[in-house]
Image (cartoon, rainbow, N blue to C red):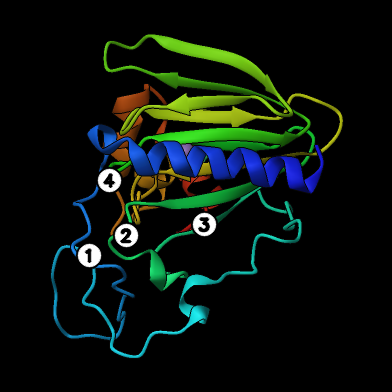
């Protein structure tokens, strides 16, 4: 897909989110801009506004290049949230770029504060989410197509193809949050007791220890 094509796809999705206030996940904005002052001592829902604002606060160049997928999942998520684009504060928007090597997996996770529109830019991905009544909704999604992951529902994507894949995701929150199931259970700090995990999954303590040692504390 040409760069201009995918920029217009993302643009359209941003517009839909902007004008669909009934699906708004974050509180509405009360002023034109409220660039986050991440250093402020004031704690509130979101971030306090900073005084000196520049175009730089609304800019991010970090999605331009492919990221290394050299990790245990062979997939890498690059997030663009209020934490790295402070101009997103109060806008109810964020996104991410996900690079997948062949066989790469964005492992089961959920976003407590946002629904997600997931657009495949290159390659093909097998994606799925699971509802609270444990139904799995899955689909193969190829370049130019998209899939929606409802807020807070567990989901994953895997590249079962032989070539790398690339996707963009858009969220209706400035800070959707991401909780990876395996990381939460096996790499929290302090850690979940081994016997709890052994009983939960019906496995031996040694197996629990093996899984814990494979997962870095924060992936
Ligand atoms: C994809 O599911 C993502 O959260 O980036
Ligand atoms: Mn996601």
**Residue at mark 1:** 46
Distance Cα–Cα, label 3 vs label 2: 22 Å
**Residue at mark 3:** 79
Distance Cα–Cα, label 1 vs label 4: 33 Å
Distance Cα–Cα, label 3 vs label 1: 17 Å
Q: How many marks?
A: 4
**Residue at mark 4:** 193
**Contact, CB < 8 Å: mark 3 with mark 4?**
no
Closer to the chain start, of discs 3 and 2, is 3
Closer to the chain start, of discs 1 and 2, is 1
- Residue 9's place in the image compared with 38, above or below, is above
Q: Nearer the viewer, residue 101 or 29?
A: 29
Residue 211 as seen in the image, left or right of residue 73: left
Q: Nearer the viewer, residue 174 or 200?
A: 174
Distance Cα–Cα, label 1 vs label 2: 25 Å
Q: Please name the residue shown 36% across and 27% down the image.
A: 150
Closer to the chain start, of discs 1 and 4, is 1
**Residue at mark 2:** 189
Mark 1 or mark 2, whichever is nearer to me:
1
Q: Position of residue 101 (x, y in %)?
A: 77, 41
Q: Position of residue 107 (x, y in %)?
A: 53, 36
Residue 172 as seen in the image, left or right of residue 146: left
For label 3, being within 8 Å of ligand 1 is answered yes
**Contact, CB < 8 Å: mark 1 with mark 4?**
no
Q: Please name the residue shown 48% across and 71% down the image.
A: 58
Residue furthest toward the bottom? 52
Q: Residues within 10 Å of mark 3 (few under 14, many from 20)?
A: many
**Contact, CB < 8 Å: mark 3 with mark 2?**
no
Say which element carries label 1: loop
């Amino acid at each position: 897909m040409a760069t201009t094509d995918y920029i217009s796809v993302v643009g359209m999705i941003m517009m839909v989110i902007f004008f669909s206030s009934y699906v708004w996940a974050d509180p509405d904005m009360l002023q034109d801009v409220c660039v986050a002052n991440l250093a402020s001592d004031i704690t509130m829902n979101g971030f306090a506004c900073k005084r000196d604002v520049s175009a730089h606060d609304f800019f991010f160049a970090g999605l331009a290049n492919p990221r290394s997928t050299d990790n245990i999942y062979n997939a890498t998520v690059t997030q663009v949230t209020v934490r790295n684009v402070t101009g997103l504060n109060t806008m109810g928007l964020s996104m991410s770029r996900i690079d997948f090597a062949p066989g790469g997996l964005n492992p089961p996770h959920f976003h407590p504060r946002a629904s997600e529109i997931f657009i495949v830019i290159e390659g093909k991905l097998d994606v799925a989410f699971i509802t609270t009544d444990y139904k799995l909704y899955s689909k193969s999604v190829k370049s130019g197509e998209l899939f929606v992951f409802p807020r807070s529902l567990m989901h994953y994507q895997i590249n079962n193809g032989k070539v790398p894949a690339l996707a963009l995701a858009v969220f209706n929150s400035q800070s959707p949050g991401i909780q990876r199931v395996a990381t939460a259970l096996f790499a929290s700090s302090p850690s979940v007791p081994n016997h709890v995990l052994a009983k939960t999954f019906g496995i031996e303590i040694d197996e629990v220890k093996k899984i814990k040692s494979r997962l870095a504390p924060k992936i």
